[in-house]
Amino acid sequence: MRILFTLLLLGMYVMLAKSSKVNKLCTTTADTLKVAELPTPTGIEMLFYLQRDPNTNTIIYELNWNKDGTLDTDDPVHPYWKLYAKQQQCVELSMIQRKFAFGVDAKQLDDEKYDIRILSYKKIPLTLMKGTDGKYHIFVTILNKQAILNRIFVRIDGGAVWSPNVKYMELKGTDIVTGKVIAERLKP
């Protein structure tokens, strides 16, 4: 877990140095940010997002479609940075970030179901599959309940780039039975 958060911090520095790889402009629901608030990203095919404080830049996880409109079965999830500090630009992850930190390992379980793991912390099983609405979602267990994952948040309280002091990681999602938002904090 400590490796994940070290890579999160290191990746931010590397990513900012290579911000010339901008490929699109994104939108957000909040145009102005307050110090205590993090922005809520929006996207047509956004599955979930990952944030950590004190930085507002966010990693977005979206579906990866082929040009013919079908889901890419070899690589169904596409993670990338959304840079709120740079006019909400979206930037591809660096190779190191993609291979060791924020990228995902996807294994197809059947025609429309995938086991998804964030590479830097594979302990949390995520499942990509269609929900009752016929759309793809990431499903995860939160508080012993099946939920659609909306957000992962990492609370960092000091430390150094190579050794951040991670207080907790929070999974937030929507309970598929009740429709209520639920959250669970996990300590490293």
Image (tube, rainbow, N blue to C red):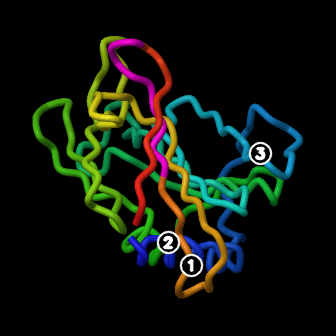
Could you say which disc has been placed on residue 184 in the image? Answer: none
Q: Amino acid at mark 2?
A: Phe
Residue marked by disc 1: 164
| Image coords of residue 109 (percent x, y) | 11, 40
Report which quarter residue 43 is drawn in.
top right
Image quadrant holding the N terminus, namely: bottom left
Q: Are marks 1 and 2 in contact (CB under 8 Å)?
A: yes
Residue marked by disc 2: 5
> In the displayed structure, would residue 138 be above or below residue 33?
above
What residue is drawn where x is 67% and y is 60%? 53
Looking at the rendered structure, the secondary structure element under dot 1 is strand
Q: Is residue 172 located in the magenta-colored stretch of the structure?
A: yes
- The residue lying toward the viewer, choosing from 11 and 51, is 51
Q: Is residue 34 located in the magenta-colored stretch of the structure?
A: no
Q: Which residues are magenta?
A: 170-178
Counting residues from the N terminus, which is met first, the one under dot 1 or under dot 3?
Answer: 3
Q: Bin the neighbour count of mark 1 within 10 Å (Cα to Cα): few under 14, some 14-19, many 20 and up.
A: many
Image quadrant holding the C terminus, namely: bottom left
Q: Is residue 13 left or right of residue 176?
A: right
> In the displayed structure, would residue 1 be above or below residue 174?
below
What residue is drawn where x is 54% and y is 58%? 154
Q: Is residue 17 left or right of residue 71?
A: right
Report which quarter residue 130 is drawn in.
top left
Q: Bin the neighbour count of mark 2 within 10 Å (Cα to Cα): few under 14, some 14-19, many 20 and up.
A: many
Q: Amino acid at mark 1?
A: Pro
Marks 3 and 2 sit apart, C-alpha to C-alpha, by 20 Å
Residue marked by disc 3: 37
